[in-house]
């Protein structure tokens, strides 16, 4: 419901900015945006909780009603776009050792308890050629071949998680690459022992996340939805 209000107000704001003052449609859109703003922003923008009615023959009053909607509609547009910009997606993979050790539920629950949202998941046994694409940035390293052999040695749980700061904080949840250097409380710190069997992979930055998501998932495999818990994680916007 709230997203529909934001979209309505956003459209009205753009329309009010571009349409001529004499247009009766502008007045109608303005009143609709003001009404939406009054409901959504009550307590935040007090002067918008009521606005003047317009007579069909009084264009100036009608324009004022439309103009009063501009601050609220613009505010809502900025708020919506800022919130969307804060939301990130990251690629997380439970490696074959994590799958074989039965740690899938444990790992997923840690991301869920943090408040992040799962938007894609599948189980796949990657080929060695696919593993080489995934680790392409490490192809000059001496351990590259063994790394690819291991990733393609069994089932992998591929996931995409969404949330504010999920890329950076997802790495904190995972812990250092070497489990011996990972803090207690992290996934690797609690569940892994050696670097060659560190059970999980996570994107290390926005560009990497984008590339890895595109490698492992088709666009239609990513789900957009509102989680009922979001208002309890982020508060009311």
Image (cartoon, rainbow, N blue to C red):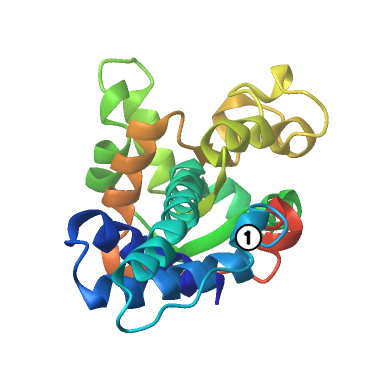
Please tell me how crowded label 1 is: few (under 14), some (14-19), or many (20+) other residues with Cα within 10 Å.
some
Q: Residue furthest front?
A: 57
Residue identifier under label 1: 41
> Could you tell me which quadrant the N terminus lies in?
bottom right
Q: Above or below — where is 186 with respect to 124?
A: above
Residue at 60 percent across and 38 percent down: it is 170
Rendered image quadrant of residue 235 = bottom right
Q: Residue furthest right?
A: 184
Side (left or right) of 230 relative to 167: right
Side (left or right) of 184 relative to 54: right
Residue at 76 percent across and 59 percent down: it is 232
Assign a secondary structure to mark 1.
loop
What x and y, as percent, mark residue 108? 66, 56
What x and y, as percent, mark residue 201? 51, 39
> Could you tell me which quadrant the C terminus lies in?
bottom right
Side (left or right) of 23 relative to 120: left
Q: Above or below — where is 164 with respect to 26?
A: above
* Nearer-the-camera pick, 198 or 15: 15
């Amino acid at each position: 419901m709230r997203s529909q209000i934001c979209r309505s107000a956003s459209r009205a704001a753009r329309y009010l900015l571009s349409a001529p003052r004499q247009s009766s449609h502008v007045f109608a859109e303005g009143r609709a945006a003001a009404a939406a703003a009054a409901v959504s922003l009550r307590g935040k923008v007090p002067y918008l909780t009521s606005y003047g009615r317009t007579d069909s023959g009084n264009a100036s009053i009608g324009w004022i009603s439309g103009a009063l909607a501009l601050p609220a509609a613009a505010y809502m547009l900025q708020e919506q776009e800022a919130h969307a910009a804060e939301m990130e997606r990251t690629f997380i993979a439970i490696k074959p050792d994590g799958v074989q050790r039965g740690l899938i539920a444990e790992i997923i629950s840690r991301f869920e308890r943090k408040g992040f949202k799962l938007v894609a998941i599948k189980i796949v046994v990657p080929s060695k050629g696919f593993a080489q694409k995934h680790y392409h940035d490490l192809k000059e390293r001496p351990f590259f071949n063994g790394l690819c052999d291991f990733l393609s040695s069994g089932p992998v749980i591929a996931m995409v998680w969404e949330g504010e700061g999920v890329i950076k904080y997802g790495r904190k949840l995972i812990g250092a690459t070497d489990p011996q250097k990972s803090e207690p409380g992290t996934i690797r710190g609690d569940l892994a022992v050696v670097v060659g069997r560190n059970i999980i992979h996570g994107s290390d930055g926005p560009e990497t996340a984008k590339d890895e998501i595109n490698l492992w998932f088709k666009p239609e495999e990513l789900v957009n939805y509102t989680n009922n818990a979001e208002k309890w994680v982020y508060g009311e916007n």
